[in-house]
Amino acid sequence: MIRILAVGKLKDARLAELAADFTRRIRPWSDLEI
C-alpha cells in the first residue's frame, strides 16, 4: 500500500514537472499574441 502511494506521488510530481515545462514552452507564444 505504502509503495503504491509513493509511486502515485512520484507520478504527480512528474506530471507537475511536465506541466511546468509545457507552460514554459507555450508562454513565449502567448506573450507574442498579446
Image: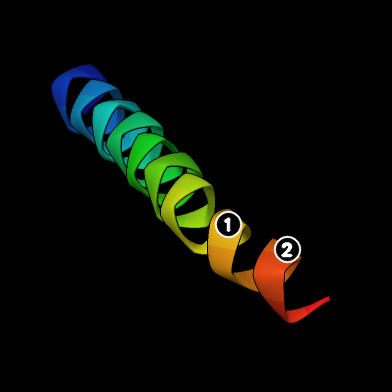
**Residue 17 point in image, percent of width and height:** 38, 34
Type of amino acid at the residue the image marks with label 2: Asp
Q: Residue furthest bottom?
A: 33
**Residue 3 point in image, percent of width and height:** 15, 20
Q: Nearer the viewer, residue 34 or 9?
A: 34
Describe the element under mark 2 as helix, strand or loop.
helix
Q: Nearer the viewer, residue 29 or 8?
A: 29
Residue drawn at (42%, 53%), measured in percent from left and top? 25
C-beta proximity under 8 Å, tags 2 and 1: yes
Residue drawn at (72%, 80%), measured in percent from left and top? 33
Type of amino acid at the residue the image marks with label 1: Pro
Q: Nearer the viewer, residue 30 or 2?
A: 30
Residue drawn at (68%, 69%), measured in percent from left and top? 32
The quadrant in which residue 21 appears is top left
Q: Is residue 25 above or below residue 34?
A: above
**Residue 1 point in image, percent of width and height:** 21, 28
According to the picture, the residue beneath numbered tag 2 turns out to be 31
According to the picture, the residue beneath numbered tag 1 turns out to be 28
> How far apart in space, not on screen, are marks 2 and 1 (Cα)?
5 Å
Q: Is residue 2 above or below residue 9?
A: above
**Residue 16 point in image, percent of width and height:** 45, 40
The quadrant in which residue 14 appears is top left
Could you classify mark 1 by the number of other residues whose Cα lies within 10 Å: few (under 14), some (14-19), or many (20 or more)? Answer: few
Q: Is residue 22 above or below residue 6?
A: below
The C terminus sits in image quarter: bottom right
